Image (spheres, rainbow, N blue to C red):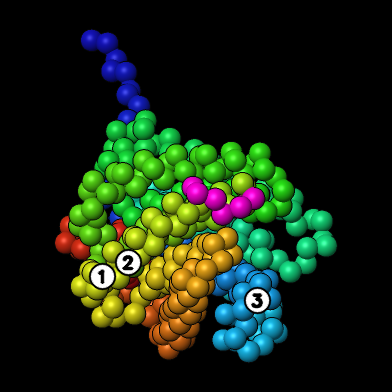
Amino acid sequence: MGEEVPQSPIAIVIDPLSNPTVLYQNVAKELAPSSSILTRFHAGYFRISLSFGSQVLLWKTLSQHIDETRAIHNILHTQTLPTITFLLLWWLTLCTLSLLSCLYILRCIFHFRLVKAEFWHHMGVNYLFTPWISWLLLLQSIPFQHLKIFPYSWWIFVIPVVMLDVKVYGQWFTTEKRFLSMVANPSSQISVIGNLVGAWVAAQMGWKESGVCMFTLGLTHYLVVFITLYQRLSGSNQVPARLRPVFFLFVAAPSAASLAWSSISGSFDTPCKMLFYLSLFLFTSLICRPTLFKKSMKKFNVAWWAYSFPLTFLALASAEYAQEVKGAVANGLMLILSALSVLVFLVVMVFSAINTDVLLREKDPAGLDSSGDQLMYEYKTFNFLDHLVLGDI
């Protein structure tokens, strides 16, 4: 009899990204038992910097048009208030965005597995656009226009947006489990807003070709996303109740498109007005359905910031519309939307200051441990990763 040939052991490697059980086990081990601010922090917190950045642009617009619009001058009774508020908000936004960016960089270094979980999540990946959108808004409102180095930093913030576009948009029409019809949700519009804001900033700097390129990419996918979401507007089944403020992204996308095309074309022409009317209609439709947001308003959550920046984008579009139309109705609409935007921003900021313990909890209220059975039980009943990535826990 011949000698038996020793067989090398076969190692079975399980890809955690293709196996939900392993993925959730790895995430739970990283969360428990010593959770920290870095484990609770996620890209969704950049909704705060988005709100701050859009408010800076709103006050910059008011300070620029105060002489042209008599109604604003009569209400504010001063020309220096918008300018002072703009400068204070800009520095506050810079500090806030820098702090959030540093926290997320540390999260990438020490908890890369959690960042990877966000990247592969159908909703979490959309919020990876928000840091770059925030920096683009801050770049557009910068008060130091004489410094020539800042326009070229546009590429630093746009290249990651384009790279994410390739990943997200590519999966929408090439990957069976990632088809847009399977993963579409209101937060999918954030990727569109990233392209439109990039086009808006490029056009403001005089780079029309780059602006048209980004605008084409954003508007094309906006039409696809909007039609997909409109056909399955039962999106509340895909979005947890506490995260339903993201429905206001329906308002932000067409408003950003109108502002971008206004900068590219040089005037708030008919296409801009059409997009503005669309955003105004969608905003009216949402505020006429307060019961949709009833559950999300029971307890404060970082998702409340999704009320602020879409409304501010609408107020910015209304300011451009009023400047073009120059009528009493247009000016009145601009004042109402601007005042409502500032009010919502202040209310959410106050609630955030009062509920800082809710923003970044020290303990996991779901009581998850590292055992697979407990983890999969929570996953099946509460969709664990949805809540982890988007800030419910």
Q: Quadrant of residue 236?
A: bottom left
Which residue in the protein does label 2 denote? Answer: 284
User: Which residue occupies 23% across, 46% down?
Assistant: 231
User: Residue 363: x percent and y percent?
Assistant: 35, 78
Which amino acid, by three-letter code, is at mark 3? Answer: Ile
Q: Which residues are magenta?
A: 266-271
Question: Which of the two residues, 239 or 208, is positioned nearer the viewer here?
Answer: 208
Q: Residue 88 placed where, x, y %?
A: 66, 81
Question: Could you tell me residue 12's position as x and y percent?
Answer: 32, 35
Q: Which residue is mark 1?
A: 288
Which of the 4 image quarters holds residue 326? bottom right
Tags 2 and 1 in contact by the CB under 8 Å rule?
Answer: yes
Residue at numbered disc 3:
66
Q: Earlier in the sequence, mark 3 or mark 2?
A: 3
Going from N to C along the chain, the mark reached first, 3 or 1, is 3
Classify mark 3: residues with Cα within 10 Å, few (<14), some (14-19) or many (20+): some
The answer to whether residue 315 shows anywhere in this view is no
Q: Single out the residue that lies furthest toward the front.
A: 327
- Which mark, by number, is residue 25? none
Magenta stretch: dominant secondary structure? loop
